[in-house]
Image (cartoon, rainbow, N blue to C red):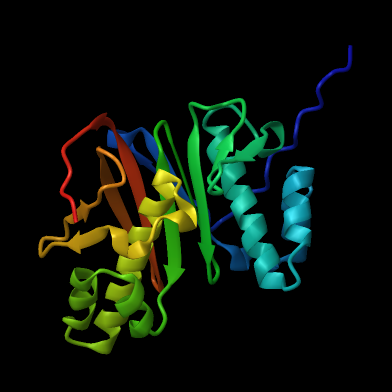
Amino acid sequence: MKRKVPIPMMPAISTLQELFLEEYDARVYWMDVRELEDKDLFSRCYKRLSDERRKKIDSYLFGRDRRLSLGAGILLDKGLSAYGLREGEVSISYGKNGKPHLSRHSHIHFNLSHSGEMALAVFAGRDVGCDIEKVQNADMELAEEFFTKGEYDYIVGQKTKNKRDEAFYRIWTLKESFVKAVGSGLMLPLNSFEIKIMADGKIDLIQNVDRRKYYFKEYPFEEYCGAVCFQSSHSSDICLL
């Protein structure tokens, strides 16, 4: 009988951070992929990932994109280790709208995102989505076309350009995290549901996709906005647009 060869442990990543969210039984991970500019570290991490992930990394032309893809693989491996698994031991399938899931471990829900030089991941026992974006100049034409009027008004109502840029990307990441949590992909128009950021920082959601309640967590990094969306395990009444 052929003995299974253990996968070597991933090298230590100094920028990799982990946060356990007890109320959702979830873990959030993030890292700065500039650390992977070290060619030796890149190579050692690369060799510890699956053939599928390595092919994905190799498909990118530019170094930054390869580092982001490798970073996503590292976070996937780290998150799976909390369940006694490794990235190279699981098979990832994709739903009809592109949402990834683990073929033989349906109790583990995860999502990945990356932007600029940062990668973000979340793992939970329920449907979940995450998004991270580097804050740049707000595209107000895009906001006017694809956001709801309430979201657009919230952005333009900010007093300074920096605040408007931040508000745009807060709305964007919150919306993307919800889309990814429900697994609708491009089939769900961004203006078919509304994110409301209250004065006390609370996030409200108006949607008619389903009758579940969703919860949000935001993670503002130095130049980035990050958001995670968790689906409740209970049905609830919703507000319809």
Please tell me whether residue 164 is drawn above or below residue 82 in the rendered image. Answer: below
Left or right of 1: which side holds 222? left
The image quadrant that residue 212 belongs to is: top left
Looking at this view, is 3 or 24 the one in front?
Answer: 24
Image location of residue 132, percent across then percent down: 44, 62
| Residue 14 visible to the viewer | yes
Q: Quadrant of residue 4?
A: top right
Residue at x-position 39% and y-position 37%:
26
Q: Which residue is more in the foreground, 163 or 182?
A: 182
Of all residues shown, which one is farthest toward the right?
Answer: 1
- Image position of 186 (left or right of 222): right
Q: Residue furthest top?
A: 1
Q: Position of residue 8 (x, y in %)?
A: 75, 37
Task: Please indicate, yes or no, whether residue 36 appears anywhere in the rendered image.
Answer: no
The image quadrant of residue 10 is top right
Q: Residue furthest left?
A: 199
Image point 36% across, 57% down: which residue?
Answer: 227
Frontmost residue, 6 versus 60: 60
- Above or below: residue 58 compared with residue 208: below
Question: Where does residue 168 sit, x and y in percent of width and height?
Answer: 31, 74
Measuring 72% from the left and 49% from the top, which residue is drawn there?
Answer: 53
Residue 230, horizontal then vertical, whole percent: 34, 42
Please give the name of the residue rendered at 79% of the width and 48% of the height, measured from the top-left corner: 47
Where does the N terminus fall, quadrant-wise?
top right
Is 83 situated left or right of 176 in this image? right
Tell me the quarter of the image containing the C terminus. bottom left
Q: Is residue 59 above or below residue 122?
A: below
Judged left or right of residue 241, residue 52 is right
